[in-house]
Image (spheres, coloured by chain):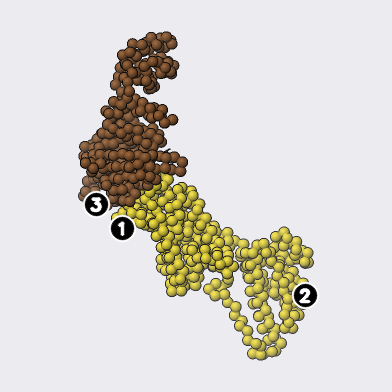
Chain colours: A yellow, B brown
Amino acid sequence: MKWRRVWSVIRKEWWHITRDRTSFILLLLSPVLLLITMGYAFSIDITNVGIGVMDQDLTPLSRQFISQLASTDALRVEKWPQSLDEVETLMMRGQTKAVVIIPRGFETDLLSGKTAALQVIVDGTDPNTAGHAIRHISAHVEHFTLEQVAEQVARAGIALKNLSPIDLSLRAWFNPQLRYTVSLIPALVGIVLSVPAMAASLALTREREWGTLEGLIATPIGRFELILGKIVPYLIAGFLSVPMCVATAVYGYKIPFVGNLGLYLLLSIVYLFSTMSISLFLSVFVSSQQVAMIASMLIFFFSGFFMSGLLIPFSLMGPMIKMEAFFFPTTHFVIISRNIFVKGASFAEIQGYVWAIVGIGAIFFTLTSLMFKKKL
Amino acid sequence: MADEWVIETEGLTRTFKKVTAVNNLTLQIKRGEIFGLVGPDGAGKTTTIRLLAAILDPTGGSAKVDGFDTVAQPEPIKRRIGYMAQRFNLYGDLSVWENLNFFADVFEMTGTERQERIEMLLNFARLTEFRDRHAAHLSGGMQKKLALACTLIHTPDIIYLDEPTTGVDPVSRREFWDILTDLHLQGITLVVSTPYMDEAERCSRVGLMYQGGLVVCDTPEAIKAMTEGELIALWPSDLRRAHDILLGTEGVLEVQTYGDQLRLFARDGDDIMARLQATLTEHNIQLADARRTSPRMEEAFISLIRRQMNEKP
Ligand SMILES: Nc1ncnc2c1ncn2[C@@H]1O[C@H](COP(=O)(O)OP(=O)(O)OP(=O)(O)O)[C@@H](O)[C@H]1O
Ligand SMILES: [Mg+2]
């Protein structure tokens, strides 16, 4: 292991990356651009969902319920169907994603202490929006019921202490407004930070295409020296994107950064190393830059979106997928990212995930330097 | 004396999926000689050099370079050789200076020795004034010289050059060979593949490859002497017809076409010279000139390859 050689490869590789200005700027900015566009795409319909309300009760209490429901910016009442037929038409045409039906007797039941019925119909073909509507409507129902019951009961002159004590506080920890973006954006940061790794998959294939690898393998350069020298410049370039992504999350998406920034930056290097080891491993076996790029894109985006728990919760994954997901560093870093960002987790609380990333990186880096042969 | 041979191969064979690029090649190269590998396109020159550079493993046979086996001990070989591939293989987005320095680092050159060596090579390759130019922006000839300079950075004992002058103008080609002759005089072993016969003539020994095998391997003089018959150069008015007519003439062994002339091997030169004029006039072909000449490498090779082709169709 000659450090001079490693350094020399690092410098040369850095020149390759930076001398083509346009692609270098693109490399630095692509994670941020992706974060902005995907963050926007995933969260666009989630606030201010238009819903319909069919009020069959038409009492002061039902009207109060409706006006409070529409008072948050999460939901907006924009349709007032009068019959179930009309509800069906609205849903069929996709003109509304959810309808709340307040049946006759809502007020009476509620005030007499009986269980009041309330029906919510959602468009199951759009689970994201529907889920959002359900979450907010049920949160509102709970809030409303407790408030009303307490008030009415008090008015009826019954001492509160006679009621069975109910925990009145419904609080979502870490994310009081239950904003979807608070969990989404830190996870997306994890995914977009795998983009620099896609560029790293070009490190070996580019030389193969140029024909320069043929000259290089005829020299005494060590495999480990070469692979290490190739990964470091991409680590540096990838690392430059991290503060940009964090800043976009904090200032652009208003996500509070609660945790330790230093720890986050440090772990992002470990994560970059791990993803880049995978793409270098890949580039040992492919001969063209295009194939390398497409293959690494498939791997990182697929694992990022479908295995990291971003779109599909872990609890819904089969055991096989869970096993596979474990081998992708993105899975672990998405969790780390959320925990540091939103919960302010310390190293001790997330170290299991960190060691997983370190392990994956070490395995693939070693495999790469072993599998890379100085032969044509 | 056994260690006179710096490169020895024994039944060296390399088969790709369908083609056998190098077929049962047994070859010895002497320390300090310029060894020329010549042969038509696809003869297996590049594959042979790659096998000798230990960057490709043979599928059969073995090769030893400076006593090291190319399969078992590739690393000691790589410290001793310089390899200049057929394809331009320097970093186009790095300057001349940066390319040289990169390879100096790879070979662990340090201190003043390194500085002197780089300056010397720049000077030697006549690239001093282009040191800050990106390699991609050099002319073809300059690129070849830079590639040679990078190959020489660690003062290798053995240099492999795969078609170093292809695509280079005649003046640069001459300069390039002057440089190679210098290296030869320093005692370095050179293995050069070339499609140019005038270059083959400058080698100590030449191996002619055809379809992966070695047809002949000898000094240029000996190879030229292998041609059968005496050579006549002639300038007839209708080249193609004259070629066919003469080929069917009694006593003619072989006819080759070169631009506007024919080159004819005759069993008896005087006899053919005497009959030539009459034979061609009979077919309404004018003859501008005809003279006896001695065979060059070119005629010798074409002749040898034709013979080879006829032997195993
Ligand atoms: N990597 C490879 N895969 C498959 N076939 C190959 C490979 N390399 C060479 N060949 C085949 O082996 C044969 C010899 O090729 P080689 O490049 O050694 O010839 P060459 O004498 O250098 O030719 P040229 O003068 O065109 O450079 C050719 O038929 C070629 O197609
Ligand atoms: Mg070749």
Three-letter code for the amino acid on which mark 2 is drawn: Arg
Q: What residue is disc 2 on? A: A104
Q: Which of label 1 and label 2 is nearer to you?
A: 1
- Residue drawn at x 68%, y 82% as measured from the top left: A149
Q: What residue is disc 3 on? A: B110
User: Are the residues flagged by discs 2 and 3 from a single subunit?
Assistant: no
- The x and y percentages for residue A271 are 44, 63
- The x and y percentages for residue B151 are 30, 43
- Residue drawn at x 31%, y 14% as measured from the top left: B270
User: Are the residues flagged by discs 1 and 2 from a single subunit?
Assistant: yes
Determine whether, in the image, residue A94 is placed left or right of residue A334: right
Q: Are marks 2 and 3 in contact (CB under 8 Å)?
A: no
**Chain that bears disc 3:** B
Q: Is the shortest distance between ligand 1 and the CB of mark 1 under 8 Å? A: no
- The x and y percentages for residue B295 are 31, 23
Near-viewer residue (A328 or B310): B310
Gap between marks 2 and 3, in whole Å? 92 Å
Lower sequence index among marks 1 and 2: 1
Instruction: Residue A80: name its quadrant.
Output: bottom right
- Residue drawn at x 41%, y 66% as measured from the top left: A266
Instruction: Residue B27: name its quadrant.
Output: top left
The reply to whether residue A92 is in sight is yes
**Chain that bears disc 2:** A
Q: Which of label 3 and label 1 is nearer to you?
A: 1
Near-viewer residue (B20 or B161): B20
The reply to whether residue A180 is in sight is no
In the image, is residue A289 above or below residue A52?
above
Q: Which of label 2 and label 3 is nearer to you?
A: 3
Q: What residue is disc 1 on? A: A1
